[in-house]
Image (cartoon, rainbow, N blue to C red):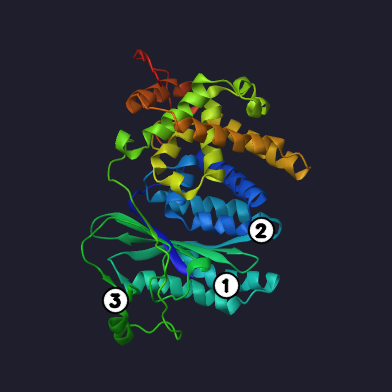
Amino acid sequence: MKRSGTADLPLHYGKVPPWLYERMSILGLSIIEVILMDYDKDEVLRRLADPFWFQSFGAVLGMDWHSSGITTSVMGALKRSINPNSQTLGIYICGGKGKFSKDTPLELMQIADKTGLNGNELVKASKLSAKVDNTAIHDGYQLYLHNFILADNGNWSVVQQGMHESDGTARRYHWHSEKIVSFVEEPHTGINGISRGEILNLTDDKAKQTRKGILDISHTDSIKIMSDFSRLILPAHHDVQASDVDLKRLGALLYVTREQQPQNFEDLLLLEGVGPRTMQSLALVSEVIHGTPARFTDPARFSFAHGGKDGHPFPVPTQIYDESIDILKKGIEKSKLGNSDKLKTLNKLHQIVTATEKDFTPNFDIQEVIEEERQTSWKYGGKTVFGDAQKPSNPKPIQLSLF
């Protein structure tokens, strides 16, 4: 197994409001269900072990695109919605933030009793992944969250997060059993974090002699891991800026969903009657489900699906959010009955946007897009942690052109 990646994030405090947490749980479960239907359990684990995908997933769910709170909130929402359906889905989520992280060994043993998996080995994997990130990586971050995501085939991923007390930043660590050969030699699939110059990394291959002298957490020989891990570093600014987004991808998305109509594309006829704003959200939800890893290098772009709870880039349009949930849930229900046409249509929407990107030249101001979203947010039930979006008394005229 191997740590798959890390992410460095500005530290955010505060709770997710109930109106958002409920929606995150439902939409998060629906997205995981579609990935399971169209791919498999191991693909769910691979996605969760990718720091770029994870951040994009959290942004689509309406969390602030660069906040440390994405980790806690997304994993909490998934645990809440997935675990009651674990026997059907074959996916279990253990652990959590603070005291809940200490429940992981007991939860794993209980799951092992149900599934016949080796509980002792799973507990060992959980403890060692936490030990490495808390002790073997001397980067100044102390873990306060540990989630162990387990499939009933025995494969797993870990998502855990540490806090740097001196500067108010967080670092998220991702692990994936598929890529790990040794816990003590370059085990991560990715790290999300801010550079702090030289750190003492006892899992680095070059630290083998040092590690032997001061750390003994594995009886197996260390083996060099060939694959690289991903590292996501997010900026301190809260607002979404042009530098945070792939403008060609965002522009193509807006062009297809706003300038075109479903009837223009034979593959999208099942979405006829769906408004342009909902199409915009569905296209980003579909990309989270079907996009290749290279498409998640700009997590901020995915906040253009359902905004952010703090109002960045704009308030959460709850009516649009609910339409996204409704369309996805109906597609899942029909697929279970043998009719997968609607889910296939969502995939086609993603493919059309991707194809449009090839010849698209971005020539628009992203701040105008954001301002338009903010001015119209009240129409779609816009909400933030500060309250409901209000109709602007003197709206600014906006002539948004995507050509």
Would residue 308 be visible to someone looking at this image?
no
Comes first in the chain, label 1 or label 2: 2
Q: Which residue lies furthest to the left in this view?
A: 197
Tell which of 267 and 359 is nearer to you. Answer: 359
Say which residue label 2 marks.
86
Is residue 373 toward the left or the right of residue 36 in the image? left
Which of the labelled discs sits on residue 206, or is there none?
Answer: 3
Comes first in the chain, label 3 or label 1: 1
Using the numbered discs, state the Cα–Cα distance from disc 3 to disc 1 in whole angstroms: 36 Å
Q: Residue furthest right?
A: 337
x, y (%) of residue 375? 40, 20
Identified at 50% across, 35% down, the residue is: 354
Mark closer to the observer (1, 2): 2
Residue 229 figure quarter: bottom left
Using the numbered discs, state the Cα–Cα distance from disc 2 to disc 3 in whole angstroms: 41 Å
Instruction: Name the residue type under label 3.
Output: Lys
Mark closer to the observer (2, 3): 3
Count of picture labels: 3
Residue 402 figure quarter: top left
x, y (%) of residue 11? 32, 51
